[in-house]
Amino acid sequence: MVMASETSLALDMSGARPSPVAAFDGGTGAVPAFGEGSRAVPRRRPRSPTSESPGMRRLLIGIAVAFLALVLFLPLALVFVEAFRGGVALYLESIVEPDALAAIRLTLLVAAIAVPANCVFGLAAAWCVAKFEFRGKSLLTTLIDLPFSVSPVISGLVYVLLFGAQGLLGPFLVRNGIEIVFAVPGIVLATVFITVPFVARELIPLMQEQGTGDEEAAISLGASGWRTFRSVTLPNVKWALLYGVLLCNARAMGEFGAVSVVSGHIRGVTNTMPLHVEILYNEYAFSAAFAVASLLALLALITLGLKTVLEWRYADGLKATRGGH
């Protein structure tokens, strides 16, 4: 009590505040040693506002994996399980059946026509949109995206109304013996329409990011337009072009809605692989239907695997192309 009174009196007379150390040590001024009368509090590293806790990360990863397993991996595995349920002999018999072979040939033929056509169109459209300014540019971009917003069934119906026997150009085509609807040309046209955006939409953003500097430099050095395109533009967009071609090919082989409307479902003539699978399934030939479906899935997996291998093989060139612009 005496010491407390003296400390208060000294504070009142001098007007000075006692130091925290003095207050802690009872006024003696001695600094307590580390660990004596005090405990060091560990400082937490501040967490980034864009990061999540480990528990939340595990939860999100688990949800994503479960979703993919439910809607992608499990159905794909069931296709192959059902395809081989009747044995390998029945599987091979379903694949080499004449109607199945005709559907496979037609699917590959349509893809072989539609993919190069859209490759040429995609390159030309991307070149126009990304490298030039002109009236109607927004309209062209909208038209390229039109197949994304129109139902494939509606697009097939448009071709029937245009080229069918009772359509706008039907009488002229009938008089000249030209078959488009319910024939291979109609299937090709419908597939080309559905797959129009894939190549162009992969190339346009990349070409816009690259600008026109490389082309202008090449032309200023005396290169012709074709030489500039072949030596400058095309190497700069080859990876985006490859990705767009792979997507276009996968959609062309798997297209169902538009092709179903314009094909006529003529077995062995106008049935592609997806249409052949539908016919077999409706006839309760489940093993044959899943066998053809597994072949279609296998073609898609080969396409995806080819894309992955090329990206891995030429990863350095891909990084250089992206990093240089």
Image (cartoon, rainbow, N blue to C red):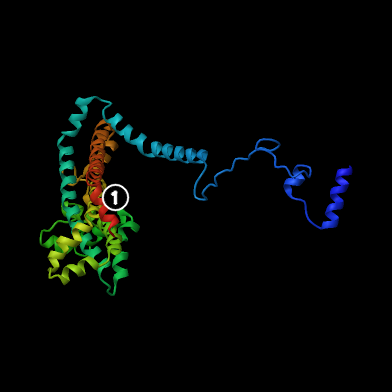
Q: Residue furthest left?
A: 176
Task: From the viewer's perspective, tell me whether residue 251 is left or right of residue 75.
Answer: left
Task: From the viewer's perspective, tell me whether residue 52 is left or right of residue 77.
Answer: right
Pointer 1 residue: 257
Residue 240 falls in image quadrant: bottom left
Q: Quadrant of the C terminus?
A: bottom left
Dot 1: element: helix
The image position of residue 230, as x and y in percent, is: 14, 61
Residue drawn where x is 14% and y is 36% of the image: 98
Q: How many neighbours does mark 1 have within 10 angstroms: few (below 14), some (14-19), or many (20 or more)?
A: many
The image position of residue 208, as x and y in percent, is: 29, 64
The image position of residue 260, as x and y in percent, is: 26, 49
Residue drawn where x is 49% and y is 47% of the image: 51
> How many numbered markers are drawn?
1
Comparing 266 with 101, the one in front is 101
Comparing 287 with 165, the one in front is 287
Residue drawn where x is 13% and y is 65% of the image: 226
Residue 166 falls in image quadrant: bottom left
Q: Is residue 198 visible?
A: no
Q: Is residue 324 visible?
A: yes
Residue 165 in the image: above or below residue 311: below
